[in-house]
Image (cartoon, rainbow, N blue to C red):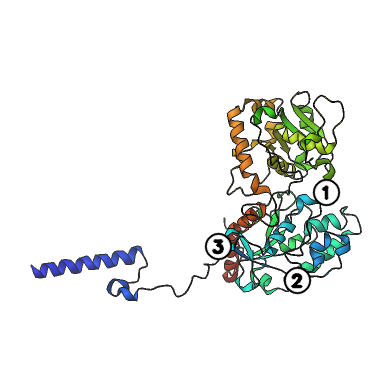
Amino acid sequence: MVGKATVSMLILAFLLLTTSVFFGNNDLRSYFYPSMSLQPSGSFPCSNGGGGGGGPLRVYMYDLPRRFHVGMLHRRARNDETPVTGENLPPWPSNSGLRKQHSVEYWMMASLLYEGGGGNETREAVRVWDPEVADAFFLPFFSSLSFNTHGHNMTDPDTEFDRQLQIDVLKILRESKYWQRSGGRDHVIPMHHPNAFRFLREQVNASILIVADFGRYPKEISNLRKDVVAPYVHVVDSFTDDNSPDSYESRTTLLFFRGRTVRKDEGIVRAKLAKLLAGYDDVIYEESVASGANIKAEEAREAFVPPGSKVALPLSIQSTQGMRSSKFCLHPAGDTPSSCRLFDAIVSHCIPVIVSDQIELPYEDEIDYTQFSIFFSDEEALEPGYMVEQLRKIPIERWIEMWRHLKYISRHYEFHYPPKKGDAVDMIWREVKHKLPRANLDVHRSRRLKVPDWWDRRR
């Protein structure tokens, strides 16, 4: 009996060991000597921020002279070479007009300069001074402001200043061992204006670009796989006291649009919509040239001309009041798929109606836009009567649900300094963090592949 029991035990042990070897990679010594089982020595090489950890993203910001960033905010400060800090950071100019809508680069830089309270645990990204411990590298070059400042007309001789800044900043990058190490893949470069960095953008196409959309970029330069879609900085004042007891009935206009109706590319839909939407009593679709003065909101509600008055309203009041008194705000594509109008509608708590077959939206891996927006394809929008009919069919209860959700998520489209948890810049850094694992994969693969493009050639 003892012999049979011994043989049975040996057979059982043999089956256990062979099963472990076949199905796993367990260390056999652990079965006999538990204290000898293999353990990792030290931390894992990728256990830092880099998109996978729970801590803030550690960002090294290049120390560029002021002429590359805040020196463009005020002409009189262009020769000032005082290092920029959180304490001496100049505020974004209140008279900047539409330049503000592409100022994401300023707010991202400001968030890294801020050294105030709140604690690192409440922030998505923090600045580090040692590049060796950085998860990502931020280039504070205001490429959008440079386009708007140095010869906005592309035939203007002043555009040479924009070109030279791009040449100079690219030289700085190429001399950086951290750029060389990754080929720029872990570098974050704001390029929000469609014409930003237009002379040399193909030289930084491996980096994580912060863009408004992909309308003017070939996919080899910018694409959703590696880049971050950031919201425009809204240019109307936020509707902070939107507390009407009957929000649906207080918004008497069904659908509102004010803007340019003649646009290029996908934006040709605007001129067609102007004809289709004419004749509705509760639809406003008007031509207007956007400017900072035209869309600046009035602070006091009493400043509006009383209803029924024949006195013409200033354009500044017309645009803001139009959004705040409308149930839906139309967002057709312009020269590119996106525009600031969408984000003006969001902070005005006007349900966006988005007409575009090519638009990409910020934070869409975390935010479901169908909870507070309505979408139509170009074909659907151009079917006579279809869009207005569909909007009228939306139940009041559904509209109120969308409006409440819109009020809640609008904080993610606000830009602040000092930065706030969950604001627009915080969300952008979250998106950067999500992109880094793929960037790191590309970096690591590039170091060992003998034929780097073999996957692209795979059938």
- Above or below residue 232? Residue 371 is above
**CA separation, marks 2 and 1?**
31 Å
Work out whether residue 436 can be spotted: yes
Task: Determine which residue is flagged by label 1.
Answer: 97
Determine whether the residue tagged by mark 1 lies in a helix, strand or loop. helix
**CA separation, marks 3 and 2?**
29 Å
Q: Nearer the viewer, mark 3 or mark 2?
A: 3
* Quadrant in which residue 112 is drawn: bottom right
Query: Which numbered disc flags the more N-terminal residue, 2 or 1?
Result: 1
Q: Amino acid at mark 1?
A: Gly
163 or 148, which is in the foreground? 148
Query: Which numbered disc flags the more N-terminal residue, 3 or 2?
Result: 3
Q: Which mark is residue 55?
A: 3
Determine whether the residue tagged by mark 2 lies in a helix, strand or loop. helix
Quadrant position of the C terminus in the picture? bottom right
386 or 10, which is in the foreground? 386
* Quadrant in which residue 206 is drawn: bottom right
For label 3, the crowd category at 10 Å Cα-Cα, with few meaning under 14, some 14 to 19 and many 20 or more, is some
Q: As drawn, which residue projects farthest toward the right? A: 157
Determine whether the residue tagged by mark 3 lies in a helix, strand or loop. loop
> Residue 160, how many percent across, how many down?
88, 62
Q: Measuring 69% from the left and 56% from the top, which residue is drawn there?
A: 210
Query: Which numbered disc flags the more N-terminal residue, 1 or 3?
Result: 3
Q: Amino acid at mark 3?
A: Gly
Q: Which mark is residue 108?
A: none
Name the side, left or right, on which 18 lies relative to 277.
left
Task: Determine which residue is flagged by label 2.
Answer: 172
> Residue 252, how many percent across, how many down?
71, 27
> Residue 90, how many percent across, how many down?
79, 60
